[in-house]
Amino acid sequence: MITIHQKAIRGHSKTGWLDSYHTFSFGSFQDPKRMGFGNLRVLNEDTIIPGSGFAEHRHEGMDILTYVTRGQLRHSDDQGNVSLISAGEAQLMSAGDGVSHSERNASDADIAQFFQIWLIPDEGAGASSYAQMTVPETGNVMLAGPASSKSLLTLRSQTTVRLVRGDEGSTTRLVDTDTCRFVQLIYGLAFAESERLSAGDGLQLPIGEETSLDWATPGALLLFTMPNERRNMS
């Protein structure tokens, strides 16, 4: 059954420097019905105030994809990677056996907004890796995917993550029924399953289901395509 993830029921945490919305359980937001979907474990939409950010912390066994939509982040990790990630760029950090990193707003004047996405790899062990790419400004783009795909960034699973853009009056068809898919609207207004979807809303499609999004305005979404519906999310 197709499930609508309404933005109004996402988890929400707000501190002095971070405003974060959680599609799936994360931090203090814990919902046993929202422990991820397929390889997709975390889908957060974050805003960081100027001059602040995530202090150094450690990850293991996850592919962590960051897509910046506004402002600029400063990345630093214990593998020697130091970089600036600007709006319109995507970063992939495969944590492998473990990596410590920090992500901070690089500006002292402007906010930074981005999607933080955790994807479960097929094999979590191994050396960590880091990559960063500029996302084309037009058309549909495969942000990340397996080594066999023509993606900007390489995941350690068969998952694909696409940036799909829609024009007013156009239709985005989701008809690959051999996979499970998750859609997250970035901006714009669309209709699916007689439901109105706007920025922050999500759409979950199990294997065997298909649907279409009809765009009422120009818009964009993230489309996750995964071979399996259920994984160990504990």
Image (cartoon, rainbow, N blue to C red):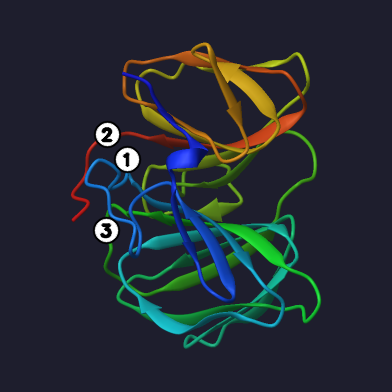
Q: Secondary structure at mark 3?
A: loop
Instruction: Identify residue for label 1.
Output: 37
Where is residue 106 drawn, in percent x and y?
72, 78
Instruction: Name the kind of residue labelled 2 in the image.
Output: Glu
Give the CA distance from mark 1 to mark 2: 6 Å
Instruction: Identify residue for label 2.
Output: 229
Where is residue 99 drawn, in percent x and y?
40, 80
Q: Nearer the viewer, mark 2 or mark 3?
A: 2
Q: Quadrant of residue 209?
A: top left
Q: What quarter of the picture does the C terminus occupy?
A: bottom left
Where is residue 149 drawn, in percent x and y?
51, 41
Label pair 1/2, CB-CB below 8 angstroms: yes
The residue shown at (22%, 38%) is 230
The residue shown at (44%, 45%) is 10
Label pair 3/1, CB-CB below 8 angstroms: no
Instruction: Identify residue for label 3.
Output: 123
Give the CA distance from mark 3 to mark 1: 18 Å
User: In the image shown, does 170 or 156 lie closer to the viewer?
Assistant: 170
Q: What quarter of the picture does the N terminus occupy?
A: top left
Instruction: Name the kind of residue labelled 1 in the image.
Output: Phe
User: In the image shown, does 113 or 75 lie closer to the viewer?
Assistant: 113
Where is residue 185 drawn, in percent x and y?
59, 36
